[in-house]
Amino acid sequence: MTDRKKPGVAFWATVGLAVVLAYLLGTGPAIWLESRELLPPIGQRALVIVYAPLIWAGDNSDAVVGVYMWYTDFWRSNEPRLLELEIH
């Protein structure tokens, strides 16, 4: 039998970072679905529960609210923001 090492701290730190990033970036598609009324009522309630910590952070931190509002507004809009840029 071969002696395999257990995953170390670097591995678990990477996994933790990936989970946090997926959670944060997942708000965009969730808001896209919700703003277009593509979620059933239970899905809308689930979003409020799942993203409650992020909603709380946005409500209680000036540093978070600017970035959070830009990101959610980007997903919420009906037209892509990239098409709104003016080239001079």
Image (spheres, helix red, strand yellow):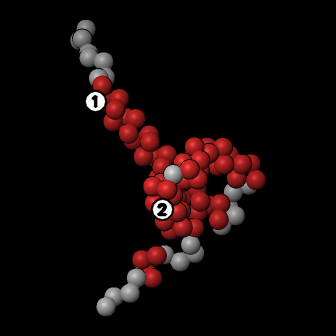
The residue lying toward the viewer, choosing from 4 and 42, is 42
The residue lying toward the viewer, choosing from 6 and 16, is 16
Instruction: Tell me if residue 51 can be seen.
Output: no
Q: At 38% across and 87% down in the image, what residue appears?
A: 86
Q: At 62% across and 45% down in the image, what residue appears?
A: 52
The residue lying toward the viewer, choosing from 62 and 37, is 62
Is 78 placed above or below 9 here? below
Is 12 placed above or below 28 here? above
State how far apart marks 2 and 1 are (Cα): 31 Å
Measuring from the top left, give residue 74's x and y in whole percent: 50, 68
On the picture, is 66 further left or further right than 45?
Answer: left
Q: At 59% across and 47% down in the image, what residue appears?
A: 56
Judged from the image, the secondary structure of the residue bearing numbered disc 2 is: helix
Residue that badge 1 annotates: 10
On the picture, is 67 further left or further right than 78?
Answer: left
Could you tell me how many numbered marks the image carries?
2
Measuring from the top left, give residue 40's x and y in whole percent: 74, 55
Give the residue type at disc 2: Gly
Measuring from the top left, give residue 1's x and y in whole percent: 25, 8
Measuring from the top left, give residue 11's x and y in whole percent: 31, 30
| Mark 2 or 1, nearer chain start | 1
Quadrant where the C terminus sits is bottom left
Instruction: Tell me if residue 33 can be seen.
Output: yes
Give the residue type at disc 1: Ala
Residue that badge 2 annotates: 66
- Which label sits in the foreground, 2 or 1? 2
